[in-house]
Image (spheres, rainbow, N blue to C red):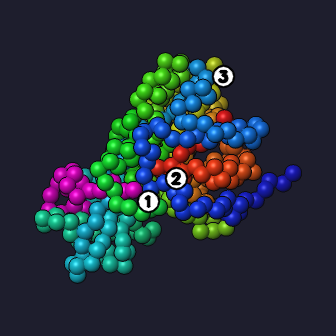
């Protein structure tokens, strides 16, 4: 049988605007969990804490420990107009790779003024539209602390407040490097992680720097024409050993979030192990992908026609994934970064 050619329109669904979560749940971990059995297609409505019943002792749970940088800067141009800069990552000791808007106004030599003689100078404009920038009027670290804002996703229409500094970071976040949170991890509390460990679940982590491309829509109806964004990741030796041990024991490997899936599958070797170290991935996972490492996925609900929804469908099956999303809409689950969660078993 010929392999199906997927179209971006195959991953579309209708989402009422009022289901897009603008704020997190009242308390961390108090989210709903839609459990999808990929063997039967059955959907079960649970609470997030029921992961204690779903993850067997001895299985491996993999987290993304990246921390979100205060990477959004709102300032003014020389003519007084508003401008925004989003830092992506440092290039060297002085320059940063960044996105900026309005793009036409942010040409080489222009400065986005932040206040108190501080600003961000445009040093270069790359072919892909990204900017190389540097801080002026102070040290980068100090100016990030003073003027940087948490970059909430574009579908959250309010401005960030003090509560986001806590709730848009996971409780296990470590090294700063991302411009978006690994949102499936936002549901976990220290208590839940401790109870999973007590149950005998092995917990390990990697670091993948979530980039703005995670929100980038697919503009072509042929997904293979989509220029997949690059994300940098680091896999420690301890995780590589934990994956090898789980494989030897025939234990399940649970990925917390699509970012963990991308890193693990990018680092996979033919035997199902993973290579430790630093690397970058442009891996795009669509139905038909052969998973070498990941067995189960805990994830939030994703945008229509997105690469993340395609990744979920690759693991759970296209038809069952889209049926699960229809169920989630009908049951009024909360969607996207601050929304509820889904578990593929």
Q: Residue at x 41, y 29 (%)?
A: 190
Compared across the picture, whether 302 is left or right of 77 comes to: right
Label 1 Cα neighbours within 10 Å, binned few <14 / some 14-19 / many ≥20: some
Q: Which residue is mark 1?
A: 156
Label 2 Cα neighbours within 10 Å, binned few <14 / some 14-19 / many ≥20: many
Disc number for residue 336:
2
> In what element is the residue under mark 3?
loop
- Seen from the viewer's position, the closer of residues 158 and 97 is 158
**Total marks placed:** 3
Compared across the picture, whether 274 is left or right of 113 comes to: right
Is residue 27 positioned above or below 22 on the image? above
Q: Residue at x 52, y 57 (%)?
A: 20
> How far is disc 2 from disc 3 in space, using C-alphas?
33 Å
Q: Residue at x 25, y 68 (%)?
A: 75
Which image quarter: residue 176?
Answer: top left
Residue 286 in sight from this viewpoint: no
Earlier in the chain: of badge 3 and badge 1, it is 1
Disc number for residue 250:
3
Earlier in the chain: of badge 2 and badge 3, it is 3
Compared across the picture, whether 249 is left or right of 151 comes to: right
Earlier in the chain: of badge 1 and badge 2, it is 1
> How far is disc 1 from disc 2 in space, using C-alphas?
9 Å
Which stretch is magenta? 133-153
> How far is disc 3 from disc 1 in space, using C-alphas?
41 Å
């Amino acid at each position: 049988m010929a392999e199906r050619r997927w179209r971006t329109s195959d991953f579309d669904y209708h989402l009422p605007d009022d289901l897009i979560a603008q704020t997190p749940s009242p308390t961390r971990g108090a989210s709903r969990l839609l459990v999808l059995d990929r063997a039967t297609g059955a959907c079960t409505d649970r609470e997030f804490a029921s992961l204690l019943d779903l993850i067997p002792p001895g299985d491996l749970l993999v987290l993304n420990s990246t921390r979100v940088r205060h990477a959004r800067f709102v300032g003014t141009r020389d003519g007084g107009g508003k401008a925004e800069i989003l830092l992506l990552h440092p290039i060297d000791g002085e320059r940063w790779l960044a996105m900026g808007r309005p793009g036409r106004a942010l040409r080489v030599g222009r400065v986005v003024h932040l206040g108190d003689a501080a600003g961000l100078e445009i040093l270069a404009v790359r072919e892909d539209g990204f900017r190389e920038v540097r801080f002026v009027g102070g040290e980068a670290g100090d100016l990030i602390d003073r003027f940087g804002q948490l970059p909430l996703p574009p579908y959250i229409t309010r401005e960030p407040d003090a509560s986001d500094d806590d709730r848009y970071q996971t409780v296990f976040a470590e090294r700063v490097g991302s411009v978006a949170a690994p949102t499936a991890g936002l549901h976990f509390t220290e208590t839940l992680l401790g109870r999973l460990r007590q149950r005998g679940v092995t917990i390990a982590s990697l670091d993948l720097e979530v980039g703005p491309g995670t929100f980038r829509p697919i503009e072509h109806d042929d997904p293979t024409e989509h220029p997949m964004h690059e994300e940098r990741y680091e896999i420690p030796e301890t995780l590589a050993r934990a994956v090898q041990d789980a494989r030897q024991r025939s234990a399940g490997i649970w990925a917390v979030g699509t970012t963990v899936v991308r890193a693990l599958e990018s680092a996979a070797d033919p035997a199902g192990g993973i290579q430790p170290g630093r690397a970058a991935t442009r891996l795009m996972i669509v139905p038909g992908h052969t998973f070498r490492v990941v067995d189960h996925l805990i994830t939030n609900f994703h945008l229509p026609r997105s690469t993340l929804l395609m990744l979920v469908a690759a693991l759970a099956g296209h038809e069952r994934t889209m049926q699960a999303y229809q169920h989630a809409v009908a049951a009024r689950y909360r969607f996207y970064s601050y929304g509820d969660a889904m578990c593929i078993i």
